[in-house]
Amino acid sequence: MTAQIVPFNTYMDPQPTEQEKALWDKFVEEYTKDYNPVEAAQRLGFNLTFAVEYSKIFLSKPYVQKLLMEHKMKPIDEKDHTEKIKALIEATLLECMQNGQPATRVVAAKTLAGIHGIDQAPDRSGEELQKLVDTFKAVAKYLPD
């Protein structure tokens, strides 16, 4: 009778069920869009509270780590890679606009406007320009000194 060699991690982490695999596969797919684990979990349908906790759990799973390693080893499609980088930059700028200090928010908004060409609006009439000035004045009231 010969002893069968079983990998060590088999004892520590049992094989995932088909449902777990499906969920974790989808998590990895969402995670690799912007590399934000909480947002990936939210896109799967978890509310923010659960998304924070489950994203940590998902990232700790050997099955998920293996999928992420396989993803890193794939040959890079330059066009796809560029689109992912753009999406990551945009996600970062949006996060800065929402959560940053006031000065950071302004810089992020200006940069994002430049990326989308919003800052190069065609000739504005005096009325549109006045609305824009009024909007900035309204926002300025809420900024700390």
Image (cartoon, rainbow, N blue to C red):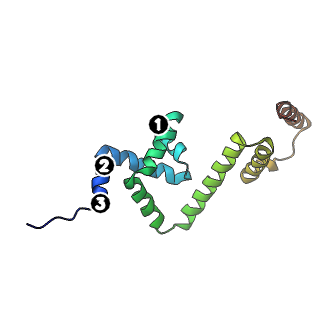
Please tell me which residue lies in front, 8 or 130. 8
On screen, residue 124 versus residue 3, left or right, reads right
Is disc 2 surrounded by few (<14), some (14 to 19) or many (20+) residues within 10 Å? few
Q: Is residue 8 left or right of residue 141?
A: left
Image quadrant holding the C terminus, namely top right
Q: Which amino acid type is marked by label 2? A: Pro
Where residue 31 sits in the image (x, y, percent)? 50, 50
Badge 1 or badge 3: first in the primary sequence? 3
Please state the horizontal and vertical placement of residue 84, each as a whole percent of the image.
Answer: 57, 57
Residue type pointed to by label 3: Phe
Q: CA distance from mark 1 to mark 3?
A: 34 Å
Dot 1, how many residues are within 10 Å of its Cα: few (below 14), some (14-19), or many (20+)? few
SS type, badge 3 = helix
The mark lying in front, picked from 2 and 3, is: 3
Viewer-side label of 2, 1: 2
The residue at 63%/56% (across/down) is 86
Structural crowding at the residue carrying mark 3, measured as other residues with C-alpha within 10 Å and reported as few (<14), some (14–19) or many (≥20): few
Is disc 2 in contact with disc 3, using a CB cutoff of under 8 Å?
no
Q: How many marks?
A: 3
Q: Looking at the image, tell me whether mark 2 or mark 3 is earlier in sequence order.
A: 3
> In the rendered structure, which disc, 2 or 1, sits on the residue that comes first in sequence?
2
Q: Position of residue 79 (x, y in %)?
A: 57, 64
> What kind of residue is marked 1?
Gly
Which disc number belongs to residue 16?
2
Label 1 sits on a secondary structure element that is loop
Mark 2 and mark 3: Cα distance apart in space: 16 Å
Which residue is under mark 3? 8
Q: Are marks 1 and 3 in contact (CB under 8 Å)?
A: no
Q: Residue furthest left?
A: 1
**What residue is disc 1 on?**
45
Residue at image location 87% in from the left, 46% down from the top: 123
